[in-house]
Image (spheres, rainbow, N blue to C red):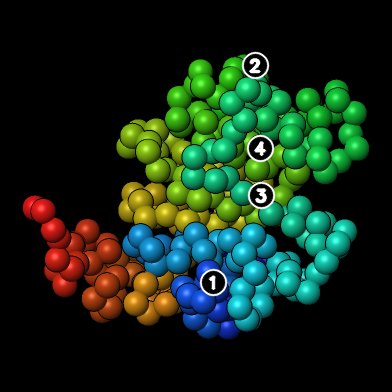
């Protein structure tokens, strides 16, 4: 990542919530082109809510989101569809279609958003699966592979349309440490080789410290960002009590735990 890289995602004064409840209040975020960026924080702090606002799945109460310089909220119709094609998303559980092979799963976005012939779609899908280390597994069903392989297949599908930005929602959730480390290595490799901007929604400390260039930390009571920067520097020198507890893995002693 270059020191003075341009922003590929800009969120300004973003207010987001559900119904009458505000989850995030006047959040400002810049994500730079080509970096591995993470949205951190405990359960219920708004990590996934912020991601949904950034990918157009949740309309904010107010504020703006710009993707590659274009206002996502002001863009409609074909222009919006074209803008959203710059984004790929891997959801927490992979969200693969169980009755489809891995090749067929990766072909889905190509079938929906391109007019390419079947042979070209298959060729692209094979290439994406190879990129994530799944060459030779094209005909396997999701139910016949491991959790780590399912995450890799989901990343391959998210890459099908050659997006500039990849959002990964809890990519290491449910994985053992060795498999998780392999996934971290894959993210670093894809970032370096392809120049894709990665946005990780996570609370996994090993992943945060091994692959993330820059991060923000959300906190529920603050309804927004309580810290931002290099995660290693935040871990070593932050004076914020919540940030210290997060990186030190200390329980919140103000919360009473029932039944223990």
Find residue 182 and report its horizontal and vertical position in percent: 43, 35
Marked residue nearer the N-terminal end (1 or 2): 1
Which residue is the site of mark 3? 88
Front: mark 4 or 1? 1
Residue, x 49% and y 81% (percent of image)?
25
Quarter of the picture holding the N terminus: bottom right
Marked residue nearer the N-terminal end (4 or 3): 3
3D distance between C-alphas at marks 4 and 3: 8 Å
Q: Single out the residue that lies furthest toward the front.
A: 19
Marked residue nearer the N-terminal end (3 or 1): 1
* Vertical order, 151 against 17 (above or below): above
Which residue is the site of mark 2? 139
Q: Secondary structure at mark 2?
A: loop
3D distance between C-alphas at marks 2 and 4: 14 Å
Which residue is the site of mark 1? 19
Q: Which mark is residue 157?
A: 4
């Amino acid at each position: 990542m270059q020191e003075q890289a341009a922003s590929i995602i800009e969120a300004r004064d973003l207010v987001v919530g559900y119904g009458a409840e505000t989850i995030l209040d006047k959040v400002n975020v810049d994500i730079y082109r080509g970096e591995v960026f993470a949205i951190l924080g405990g359960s219920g702090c708004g990590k996934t809510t912020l991601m949904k606002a950034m990918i157009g799945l949740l309309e904010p109460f107010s504020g703006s989101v710009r993707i590659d310089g274009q206002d996502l909220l002001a863009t409609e119709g074909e222009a919006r569809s074209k803008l959203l094609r710059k984004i790929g998303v891997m959801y927490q559980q992979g969200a693969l279609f169980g009755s489809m092979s891995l090749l067929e799963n990766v072909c889905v976005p190509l079938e929906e958003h391109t007019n390419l012939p079947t042979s070209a779609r298959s060729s692209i899908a094979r290439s994406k699966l190879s990129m994530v280390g799944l060459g030779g597994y094209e005909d396997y069903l999701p139910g016949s592979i491991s959790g780590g392989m399912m995450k890799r297949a989901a990343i391959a599908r998210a890459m099908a349309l050659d997006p500039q930005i990849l959002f990964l929602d809890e990519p290491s959730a449910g994985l053992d440490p060795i498999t998780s480390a392999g996934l971290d290595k894959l993210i670093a490799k894809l970032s370096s080789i392809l120049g894709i901007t990665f946005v990780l929604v996570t609370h996994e400390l090993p992943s945060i410290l091994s692959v993330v260039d820059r991060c923000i930390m959300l906190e529920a009571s603050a309804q927004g960002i309580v810290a931002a920067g290099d995660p290693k520097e935040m871990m070593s020198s932050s004076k914020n009590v919540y940030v210290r507890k997060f990186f030190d893995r200390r329980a919140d002693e103000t919360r009473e735990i029932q039944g223990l």
